[in-house]
Image (cartoon, helix red, strand yellow):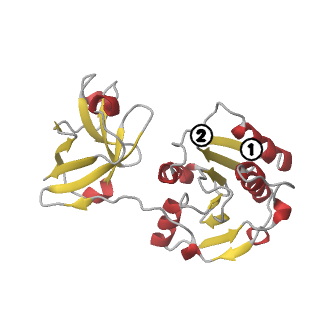
Amino acid sequence: MAVISLLTDFGDRDAFVGIMKGVIWKIAPQVQVADLTHWIEPQNVLHGALILGQAYSYFPPGSVHLAVVDPGVGTQRKAVAVRIGDFYFVAPDNGLLTVPLERAEKSGNPIHAVELNEPRFWLPEVSRSFHGRDIFAPCAAHLANGVPLDEMGSRLESNTLVRVAIPKPSRTSTGWQAQVLMADVFGNLISNLTTDDLGEQKIERVVIAGTTIERFTRTFGDAPAGSLITMFDSSGYLSVCVVNGNAQRQLNVRVGEPLEVFTY
């Protein structure tokens, strides 16, 4: 059975997500729809790209990942469908697909991309402000029904697809300079420093917003409630956390806040 995942910045107060599901099921009633998240920060393409990058590979082969964070809706930005490895992606061409594209280029996986410019796969009427309903949802449903990618539109070279700049950590004489990429619902501050970056290095301490954190743990349970800790999260990113608390609120920091990571 085909699977379509949905990632948007629509929230769940309005009918936008439900309408997109209705469009999908009208075309492909057999499809399972998985809500990845609808709480991407509004118009924040980088946030959407990071969350999609964390999640897509956990889905079954052949899944269609439909992502709509689209501040350029109604403009000349392209609507695209891309096959990368075992997965299909349907999204505006604005950088949402940066992580799977970069991984594919690094690993040598083939990338097959088309512009979704065949109106027969859209809804009959297309608005200037809801392409998630009018273009992306129907195209994702047709892909899930087995329509070949090349029938959906004109072929694109993968190097023309838009990427967003994902901040990278940098080496220093004492360790690493990193920064907060995002905060999760628990207030954990997720940085851009990974286990792969560190290799065999060990963390001595982390300084963020004038606060020095010397407690590095493997799990939340390794420190008492209320402790300010650093640890690697389930995706391998160094995170600043408060055990049973909220590090973002306690430290009063935002995305982009620098971290100085001392290693040995």
Residue lying at the far top of the rendered structure: 225
Would residue 19 appear left or right of 69 to someone viewing this image? right
Identify the residue shown where x is 80% and y is 41%: 22
Residue 247, position in %: x, y? 31, 32
Would residue 113 appear left or right of 264 to someone viewing this image? right
Q: For label 2, count other residues whose C-alpha is less than 10 Å away and answer few (under 14), some (14-19) or many (20+).
A: some
Q: CA distance from mark 1 to mark 2?
A: 12 Å
Work out whether residue 111 or residue 157 is closer to the camera in this orientation and state it: 157
Residue 86, position in %: x, y? 62, 62
101 lies above or below 47: below
Question: Looking at the picture, which amino acid does disc 2 mark?
Answer: His
Question: Looking at the picture, which amino acid does disc 1 mark?
Answer: Met
225 lies above or below 19: above
Mark with earlier residue (1, 2): 1
Helix, strand or loop under label 1:
helix
49 lies above or below 119: above
Q: For label 1, count other residues whose C-alpha is less than 10 Å away and answer few (under 14), some (14-19) or many (20+).
A: many
Q: Quadrant of residue 252?
A: top left
Identify the residue shown where x is 80% and y is 67%: 118
**Residue under numbered circle 1:** 20
Would residue 130 appear left or right of 210 to someone viewing this image? right
Work out whether residue 105 or residue 18 is closer to the camera in this orientation and state it: 18
**Residue under numbered circle 2:** 38
Helix, strand or loop under label 2:
loop
Q: Are marks 1 and 2 in contact (CB under 8 Å)?
A: no
